[in-house]
Image (spheres, rainbow, N blue to C red):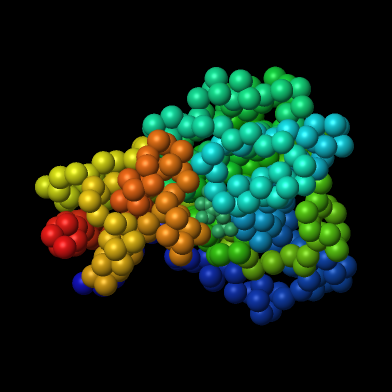
Amino acid sequence: MARIYLDHAATTPLDNGILEKMLPYFTMEFGNADSPHATGRKAMNAVDFARDNVAELINAKPNEVFFTSGGTEADNWALQGGAYAAKEKGKTHIILSAIEHHAVLGAAEKLQREGFDVTYLPVNEGGRVELNSLKAALTEQTGLVAVMAANNETGVLQPIQELAEIAHSVGAVFFTDGVQAAPYMPIDVKAWGVDMLSMSSHKFYGPKGCGVLYIKNGVKVKGLIVGGEQERGLRGGTTNVPAVVGFSAAYRKATAEMAENNEKICAVRKAFLEGISALNGVQINGEGLPAVLNLRIKGVNNVDLVYKMDLEGVSIAAGSACASASIKPSHVLLAMGMSEEQAKECVRISFGKNNTEEEAYEAAKIFVSVVEKLRKN
Ligand SMILES: Cc1ncc(COP(=O)(O)O)c(C=O)c1O
């Protein structure tokens, strides 16, 4: 059997038809979108079309959509740009959940070194931020609150609308990392009540290296990358036109197919869980997005399990892709109350729209046999 890929939270393959939409902007329509001549204008038209498309899909206005080099840049921008703007109003306190992606955590650590006060919100055993903990952490000094919509390691969803309302009660700006939620949930920035939201194209079968930061009109955010007037003077750098075109086309497709894809993924997840049901000592860590399954396999080291599964032709992860090169236990699972030893027994299996139930049963069979062998050693 061909390799079975169960690591869609790390990245997804480019979808059918997306490359074809991108190709002309590498070759025939290669213009710099900021050049005023016809070659440049053609490229800019494609960027404008993409911006309008994304804006419509997330219920924003086109001038609220900013293209970036990916989710990491969008997260860095939201945190730093939001915090620096808040500081100008005398607000130097920021709040974020303890389970944010490293792109957000790293930016917060930088801000802390620069003198900002940072509060990390705990999560409960199920991986959710409690509304009361945000209420308790807010002060008149709070300028920015960041809580992700869906976690990349567990798939757990957060009550974004309620959290945003609470943040607004002291006039703080509310940012949500929507990178993992975007492929599976319709995003409506107005209904969610968020001021900023990040997305990344390679999580919904678009190209790598392209993201979006939504910034609500009227919300003050400083630019992060200087040296050019692109993205309304807030994000310097020649626009990556093919990637922007790919982002837009892939997100349109993902949104149109969302219900159908979610249904497929639920069936695949069910098949995998059925296939491993004979194993004892298995615990599911937090539940939310059906695509993400975080399992603790008692008595088995996650790095060994991922390695052996790989040798057997199945790609899974021991946490997030960014952390998988390190052997540190997951900060997300620790925040959910696990010990370091328990967290090192956890793996992330993430399903995609192209997985079949047959593959899920096959992967589960391999998983059971690998776990049994590892437990005997
Ligand atoms: C929740 C979350 N935020 C941000 C990122 C970073 O996105 P990118 O890979 O586009 O830099 C990821 C990627 O794994 C993610 O899962």
90 with respect to 64 (left or right)? right
> Which residue occupies the foreground of this view, 52 or 139?
139
From the viewer's perspective, is residue 339 above or below residue 322? above
> Which residue occupies the foreground of this view, 301 or 222?
301
Q: Residue at x 53, y 70 (%)?
A: 19
What is the x, y in percent for residue 297? 25, 49
From the viewer's perspective, is residue 116 above or below residue 32? above
From the viewer's perspective, is residue 356 above or below residue 114? below
User: Which quarter of the picture shows residue 170?
Assistant: top right
For the question of whether residue 18 can be seen, the reply is: yes
Total label count?
Answer: 0
25 with respect to 203 (left or right)? right
The N terminus lies in quadrant:
bottom left
What is the x, y in percent for residue 196? 68, 40
For the question of whether residue 346 can be seen, the reply is: no
The C terminus lies in quadrant:
bottom left
348 with respect to 363 (left or right)? right
320 with respect to 179 (left or right)? left
> Which residue occupies the foreground of this view, 254 or 123?
123
What is the x, y in percent for residue 199? 59, 50
Report the image quarter containing ligand 1: bottom right
The residue furthest bottom is 27
What is the x, y in percent for residue 285? 34, 40
Q: Residue at x 77, y 42 (%)?
A: 115
